[in-house]
Amino acid sequence: MTKSRAPARSKTAGKLPSKQDILDFLKASTAKPGKREIARAFNIKGNDRVALKELLRSMADDGLIAGSRRELARPDVVPQVAVIDIVERDRDGEFIARPANWEEKQGPVPRILVIKEKSNTGLAAGIGDRVLARVAERGGNADYPYQARVIKRLARATQGLLGIFRKLQGGGGVIDPIDRKQLREWSVPRGQTGDAENGELVRFEIARASRFGAQSARVTDRLGSPEAERATSLIAIHTHGIPEVFSDAALAEAEAAAEPDAKRREDLRHLPFVTIDPADARDHDDAVWAEPDPDPANRGGWVVMVAIADVASYVKPGSALDREARKRGNSVYFPDRVVPMLPERISNDLCSLKEDETRPCLAVRMVFDKDGRKKSHRFLRALMRSAASLAYQQAQSAIDGRLDAVTEPLLKTVLRPLWGAYASLVLARTERAPLDLDLPERKILLDEKGKVRDVITPPRLDAHRLIEEFMIAANIAAAETLEAKRTPLIYRVHDAPSKEKLASFAEFLGTIGLSFPKAGTLKPSHFNRILAQTRGSETADLVSEVVLRSQSQAEYAPGNFGHFGLNLRRYAHFTSPIRRYADLIVHRALIRALDLGPDGLSDVEIAELEPIAQAISGTERRAMLAERETADRLIAAYLADRIGVRFQARVSGLVRSGLFVRLAETGADGFVPASSIGHEYFVHDEARQALVGEDTGAAFQLGDSVEVKLVEAIPTAGALRFEMLSEGRLIGGKPKRRPASKTGRPVQRQSRTRKRR
């Protein structure tokens, strides 16, 4: 392997490289170096490595680099050695390729000219091939910014290649890919259709007859009608490679699972725990109970217990069930189905805290004073029995005075103590001042055929917030216990915004007459003050959106750097081991630390915590993307028969080529091309988060309320395209005069944008 070299000027010991130094180093590297290689190249040692880590994290937040701790690269640049897919020929007959792994956030997909190697016919490749290639920039060539020389052909993974098959007269057909990045259709020769019917959803692979054969595809699986019930989520499952079928060994282990030995467990079955979940929940993995603290020294205080299903009793380290859970990382939730992390025998039966059934649990008993400050906590393995399975709305209605047959006998002894404890915890939360972004979440309701019946935004109830506060308290207790016992764990971490994002945020605030502190330790309360200042104003939604975008993304890590959003020094996920592998790791760590049984965290797992954390952070992002794409496809289908209808919307994003809008009615996201906005140039003003007309000064700013008309809906791609009906508004600054033609009349120019840096 060729070693990467740092620029000569960066060899000074102890001198932290600049961001440009690191970008230059990554560009010169023939492989993807990690943090260790960067530190070695720039001679960074000792405590300076911490500063380097912060610098790299800041660059990642700003999108300057991407990858893991072991492999870093510039996200907008194709590496010098890369995997590429040969996808077409140009007019001159040359092969054109694109990077095999390129995300939208990296920018436009670069086209790569494949250089023919006449002297090395053994490496001949053609359309449809995936190859490992040596890539070089071509210096200002707009059509093909890169060229590549093939190193070797690779086996191409077929999972994720999905499309809609269309029959052609005379045999054969074409496939319209589901993937939005594939902007072309694939021809399917006669005999390669797999007997697919017209309009069917199919999985396909790229095929070719020879090196110079016409580009074609071969159907490998028929997945049924894309209009069929549950087909939309199936597209996301296959596109993102989400495992949905459990191995026979895992299913056999689940079926053979028996209740664990109760000898070493405390008996909590006399306590009236309740579960409070969504009305349509199929599993119940957490239960809560509270009472006033009987200790006279803690007058007005509360005892709160959170009991979590003891998944570790059934899923042993290294077992087939464990391997499946680790591979999935988390459950994935679609409007029409759940792809569970564990088989239903575990998640919906043995580890579901069903009403009036005895279940093993890992519980935490916490004592709070009257102001919600935790005085003590203790973890225990126990047996519990749920007194009732309540829905959020049902529990809230009972507290509000609307009782039913289930909640009436629970009101005084169960529900009121829970709300009393919650009131105290709210005081502590207010004092802690976490980031106060209470954003609405849309929910898609389906009919019996799997079609969208309605899109709603459920109200945020105190019942939701109560469970959230209790779960946060339990998660904090888990992290504190494991740190005190010096037991390795996986933290849930959330870094503070980078300096560059803060500078951009401060610059934006200046455009609306607000300021942001430039010195001192950054806290969520600084953002909360801005949110409070603008609450109820016309800029409130805009400010909330910009605050959200300035934040880092939460992730899992074996090292702790706190949770900025919650304003916590330490935090771990403990409360959902049925659906998150991170929580199962924390359960095992507690069992090991407190000697609660033989099924605790193993030495092998401790040695693998870092790759586990990286993997489950990735599966979490995969699930979020799949869930969002499924929602987009369902809503696009829902709106497909409303072409030409006008909608009220809000500007939700800005790029040089146009803007994104979010509909008020459904929360659907769509794109408004710049060409539908007006007849002038539009400048992307990053400071003001706006597209500004260069001639008139009319602008569309992030958060603006606008009216748009739906002009296109593509359900299979989840894409909506709108035309702008609203006029822009002046947001400050003098509009530039429209240039005149030779006749003295204003020139009407085609709308396009350019970016102001």
Image (tube, rainbow, N blue to C red):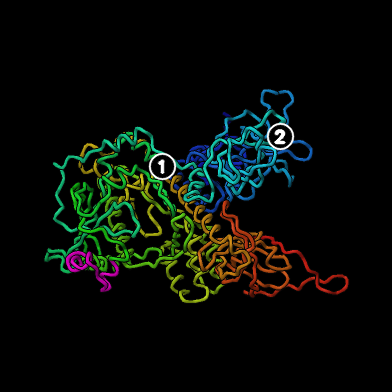
Q: Position of residue 377 (x, y in %)?
A: 21, 55
As drawn, is 72 to the left or to the right of 277? right
As drawn, is 333 to the left or to the right of 700? left
Q: Position of residue 367 (x, y in %)?
A: 20, 60
Q: Is residue 486 visible?
A: no
Q: Is residue 193 magenta?
A: no
Task: Give the residue pinned by disc 2.
Answer: 214
Q: Quadrant of residue 277?
A: bottom left
* Crowding at mark 1 (Cα within 10 Å: few <14, some 14-19, many 20+): many
The residue nearer to you, when weighing 502 against 101, is 101
Where does the N terminus fall, quadrant-wise?
top right
Q: Position of residue 63 (x, y in %)?
A: 55, 51
Q: Amino acid at mark 2?
A: Ala
Please state which of the two labelled residues, at mark 1 or mark 2, is closer to the viewer.
Answer: 2
Task: Give the residue pinned by disc 1.
Answer: 328
Where does the C terminus fall, quadrant-wise?
bottom right
Q: Quadrant of residue 485?
A: top left
Which stretch did the figure color magenta?
A: 395-414
Q: Secondary structure at mark 2?
A: loop
Residue ID at (54%, 48%):
226
Q: Amino acid at mark 1?
A: Arg
Give the mark nearest the N terminus, 1 or 2.
2
In this rendering, the answer to whether 274 lies above or below 146 is: below
User: Residue pushed farthest bottom?
Assistant: 537
The residue nearer to you, when weighing 481 against 400, is 400
* Crowding at mark 2 (Cα within 10 Å: few <14, some 14-19, many 20+): some
Q: Is residue 565 visible?
A: yes
